Image (cartoon, rainbow, N blue to C red):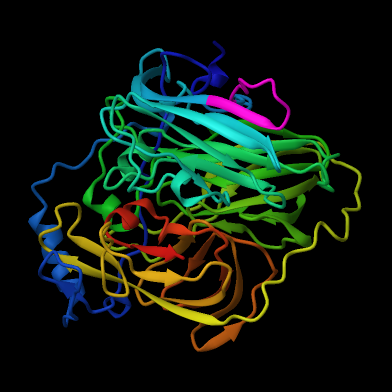
Amino acid sequence: MKRRHFLMNFTAAVGGLVATKAIAKMEHTKMTGMTCELNSDDCNKGDNMHEHMNMNMNMNHDQKPQKLLPTSSLKQNDNLPSLINLKNESNQPGVFEATLHLKPVKIALTPEITTEFWAYNGMIPGPKIEVNEGDHVKITVKNDLPQATTVHWHGLLIPSNQDGNPQDAIPAGKSRVYEFDVPKGNAGTFWYHPHGHETVAEQVYRGLAGTFIVRSKDDPLNSLPEQHWFFSDLKLTDKGEIADNTMVDWMNGREGQFVLINGSYRPKIKVDSATRVRIWNACSGRYLNLSIPDCDVFLVGTDGGLLSEPVSLNKPLLLSPAERAEIVILPKKTGTVYLQSIGYDRGKMGNVPPEQDMLLAELDLTQSNSITLPSTLRTLPKLGQATAHKKLEYTEVMDMKEPRGGMLFLINGKRHDMNRIDLESKIHEVEEWTIHNNSHMDHNFHIHGAQFMVVSHEFNGTKTLPQYVALKDTVNLRPHETITIKIQQNMPGLRMYHCHIIEHETLGMMGQLMVK
């Protein structure tokens, strides 16, 4: 096995996810001023949340500080590994049939370090699923983890009972079959990951995530060479074991000292012509603010597939956890540059160091001739006038009875309850949702079963239009920002909506929508 594939394509070796140093010191004025003395749905405002939070952190000082593996311990500058396709076991045209086997595996990261991960088919990341619009998909999932799990097909427009909701757990040692049709017009860059109740954070940071690409025969960018950049992060103890979440991880979202691309640490990526790149932010809590030097960069797609037209990017591309993007990059020079994530202050809690730029990969560029991208990539749907309206408010509160950091993250003052329906929608009705982040830190919004369009942002008293029109399933909200979206649910059943900082959804920032 080649070292550059040290996290892929094996049956008994390992790869995973992590926590880097956290961010700027919290200011008193940034806090929402809420506390929660009881572990209940509804929380009342208090007069000094910052004081309560620091007190709670002091109460947890008996936790031993984590000793993490130095970043110099893993090999760098291997060639970017290709993602391995999940084999289609069907010979029938238009049918994709396969098996995903979830189990613990041990992977040798170096001759000295072997780590146990939880993996799909023994791979970190999991195998790449590629299908075409209109295909019938049938995937058998075998769960040999020590916990129940689900598989959520993130971003795909499929029936509720096939979407891996936390209510539909696969018990340890059992199997189930997911079966659905991929709708026409649903081409794009998607992924799959667990969505179990109270288990999703651990299962993702132990390695469970994979890519899902839906292709269209009418794709106007089919002629371009294509690369895949699947970002995850890995947090290892000094003994090479996957670290448990700390209090800071639960409060801010887990980040690891190793940011991986396709399972490789700081790989070398060759770009010698105009290239289409599909990008996934599959990190638990890390925001990526991607800078690609000495290249023309065009955004051509987001969570819901292609844009209507290319957008030239003149600043870093910010992707919150679970967001995806498709870009076209054109090298303007020949030489070596570095793909970086530029430090982005998302208002983390606690006494943590400031954000810093992070080197992610070495780019080996060859100057290329300019190209003319199609002026029209596709025609986006028009949702029409909204006839129903919904409002969500994000807040964060202290709860001294919550052992995982002493924090709860709430929507409309309530924590997620699997036995409660929070909202109802009528099938096919066009709705306008207003989401207000009434907290001191960034959160994002993700919804199952539908894609939406952002109508407006309101920040610091100023309302603005989005920079471009796109179909999305995940969008970021800055502290005290309000976003208005337009959305239509076209299949009945239960759908989840939540912040996709995975620790925050686990600690309550999730609701349930019933579509009738």
Q: Is residue 263 visible?
A: no
Q: Is residue 276 above or below residue 173?
A: below
User: Residue at (47%, 53%) from the top-left corner?
Assistant: 321
- Residue 58 relative to residue 463: left or right: left
Q: Residue at horizontal 28%, vertical 76%? A: 31
* 67 is higher (above) or lower (below) than 74: below
- Please tell me which residue lies in front, 253 or 468: 468
List x then y, in percent, for residue 137: 59, 35
Among all residues in the image, which is located at the extreme bottom? 461
- Between residues 94 and 221, which one lies in front from this camera angle? 94
203, above or below 87, in the image = below
Disc tally is 0
Foreground pick, 355 / 219: 219
Which residues fall within the magenta stretch?
86-98
Quarter holding residue 436 = bottom left
Q: Is residue 148 visible?
A: yes
Q: Quadrant of residue 230?
A: top right
Q: Is residue 301 left or right of residue 156?
A: right
- Residue 315, given in percent of the width and then of the height, sits at 66, 62
Looking at the picture, how far across and down is residue 285, in whole percent?
A: 40, 52
Between residue 351 and residue 434, name the one nearer to us: 434
- Give the quadrant of the N terminus: top right
Magenta segment, principal secondary structure? loop
Give the image location of residue 425, x and y in percent: 47, 70
User: Residue at position x 41%, y 64% from top?
Assistant: 514
Q: Is residue 390 magenta?
A: no
Q: Residue at x 41, y 74 (%)?
A: 479
